[in-house]
Image: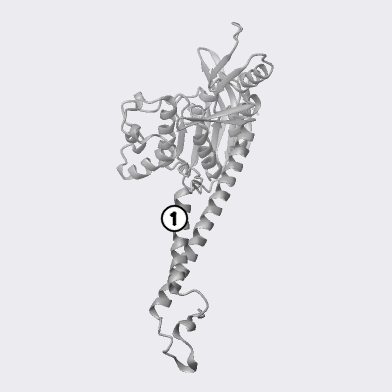
């Protein structure tokens, strides 16, 4: 920025920033005199910094005026308008189909029951008059001609119909299993402390997590949030303190740097983790997170960060945990995958501890927050 550019291009500028720095960057961009373009999946950041959105999808760019909320509203209006036009078109087609069937059926009846005028039934009424056609009205030939004309109109309408049914992407149906832990508290932390090279990182940490609650741990970068999660999940030893879990607790842990993935495994091998009966569930979870099918049998080491993140999340999905410990789970996900994960976490009936600088995501998921400052006093 000190180079004083004429145009600023930013690719995912918020991914590893803490909230304080994100707020600073937002303020900087809003007061910038030069134009800027950014690629971003942080919906709050987009809301605060964008006045035009270009959506890139299937090789095509669509332009929307306004911020992210305006973009969503415009998509909703466009979907409803397209659906209304489609339904009107389908109604017209159905009407013509019904008219054709009725006229064709009537013409066939008239043909089958046609009789010479000299042949009279009881009361002297001609058989074809019994079907509602008077001698002065349409005969069977004109009725059939009318039916075929209707069929021609119907075929022409179907050929020219260019209003396609709008499609909602239903593949993002990420779901965790229902959890019913009976304990009032599923986690208690007492007097937890941790130091590195005589530098205190965590000091006398106390908190508890109630059944079904979703807690965010907040604080600046370097404040020890990831260290705390590693200690809670048993991936790092504490210097002192106690951590209590009920015996039946199972933890699903998402690590920010994804170092708990086995890079030599393929994506599908990593997710099923030797449990081959879960292969179908693994395929479904990866598909719902929109991992391309051709990547399922590639080694994890060859995947991008975003693709690795989806593998890690899918692995947690099918493990059926009753506590989720998630360290920046949205960092490398596109917005649709974020929204799928967000919906799944809101509906998750177990408890959650989450570290995330994504304000939009936090606002939809968490029940309360713990702030960590300095050497980590949680309040």
| Whether residue 266 can be seen here | yes
Judging from the image, the colouring scheme is one colour
> Does 148 sit left or right of 62 as displayed?
left
Residue with the most extreme right position: 31
> Does 98 sit left or right of 34 as displayed?
left
Residue 367 in picture, x, y percent from top left: 62, 38
In the image, residue 141 sits, relative to residue 66, either above or below, namely: below
User: In the image, what residue occupies the spot 48% across and 80% down?
Assistant: 131
| Whether residue 224 can be seen here | no
Look at mark 1 in the image and give the residue it sits on.
155
The quarter of the rendered structure image containing the C terminus is: top right
Residue 189 in picture, x, y percent from top left: 56, 32
Nearest the viewer among 183 and 165 is 165
User: In the image, what residue occupies the spot 40% across and 38% down?
Assistant: 286
User: In the image, what residue occupies the spot 46% across and 61% down?
Assistant: 149
In the image, residue 241 sits, relative to residue 113, either above or below, namely: above
In the image, residue 367 sits, relative to residue 84, either above or below, namely: above
User: In the image, what residue occupies the spot 43% across and 63% down?
Assistant: 148
The quarter of the rendered structure image containing the N terminus is: top right
Residue count near mark 1 (Cα–Cα under 10 Å), binned few <14, some 14–19, many ≥20: some
Residue 105 in picture, x, y percent from top left: 43, 72
- How many dots with numbers? 1
Which of the 4 image quadrants contains residue 275? top left
Nearest the viewer among 284 and 248 is 284
Residue 39 in picture, x, y percent from top left: 54, 23
């Amino acid at each position: 920025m000190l180079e004083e550019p004429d145009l600023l291009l930013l690719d995912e500028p918020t991914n590893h920033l803490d909230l304080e720095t994100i707020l600073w960057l937002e303020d900087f961009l809003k007061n910038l005199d030069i134009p800027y373009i950014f690629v971003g999946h942080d919906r709050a950041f987009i809301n605060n910094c964008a006045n035009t959105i270009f959506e890139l999808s299937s090789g095509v760019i669509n332009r929307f005026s306004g911020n992210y909320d305006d973009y969503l509203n415009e998509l909703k209006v466009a979907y409803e308008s397209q659906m209304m036009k489609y339904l009107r078109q389908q109604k017209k087609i159905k009407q013509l189909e019904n008219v054709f069937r009725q006229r064709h059926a009537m013409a066939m009846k008239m043909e089958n029951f046609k009789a010479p005028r000299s042949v009279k039934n009881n009361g002297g009424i001609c058989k074809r008059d019994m079907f509602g056609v008077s001698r002065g009205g349409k005969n069977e030939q004109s009725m059939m001609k009318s039916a075929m004309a209707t069929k021609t109109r119907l075929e022409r309408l179907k050929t020219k119909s260019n209003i396609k049914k709008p499609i909602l992407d239903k593949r993002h149906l990420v779901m965790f299993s229902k959890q019913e832990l009976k304990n009032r508290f599923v986690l208690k932390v007492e007097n937890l402390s941790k130091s590195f090279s005589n530098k205190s990182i965590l000091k006398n940490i106390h908190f508890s997590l109630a059944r079904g609650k979703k807690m965010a741990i907040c604080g600046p970068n370097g404040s020890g949030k990831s260290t705390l999660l590693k200690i809670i999940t048993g991936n790092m030893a504490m210097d002192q303190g106690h951590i209590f879990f009920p015996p039946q607790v199972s933890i699903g842990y998402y690590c920010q740097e994804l170092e708990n993935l086995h890079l030599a495994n393929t994506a599908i091998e990593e997710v099923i983790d030797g449990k081959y009966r879960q292969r179908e569930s693994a395929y479904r979870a990866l598909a719902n997170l929109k991992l391309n099918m051709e990547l399922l049998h590639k080694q994890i080491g060859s995947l991008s960060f975003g693709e690795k993140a989806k593998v890690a999340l899918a692995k947690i999905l099918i493990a059926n945990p009753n506590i989720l410990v998630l360290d920046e789970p949205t960092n490398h996900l596109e917005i649709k995958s974020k929204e799928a994960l967000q919906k799944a976490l809101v509906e998750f009936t177990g408890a959650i501890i989450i570290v995330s600088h994504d304000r939009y995501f936090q606002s939809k998921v968490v029940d309360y927050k713990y702030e960590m400052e300095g050497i980590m006093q949680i309040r």
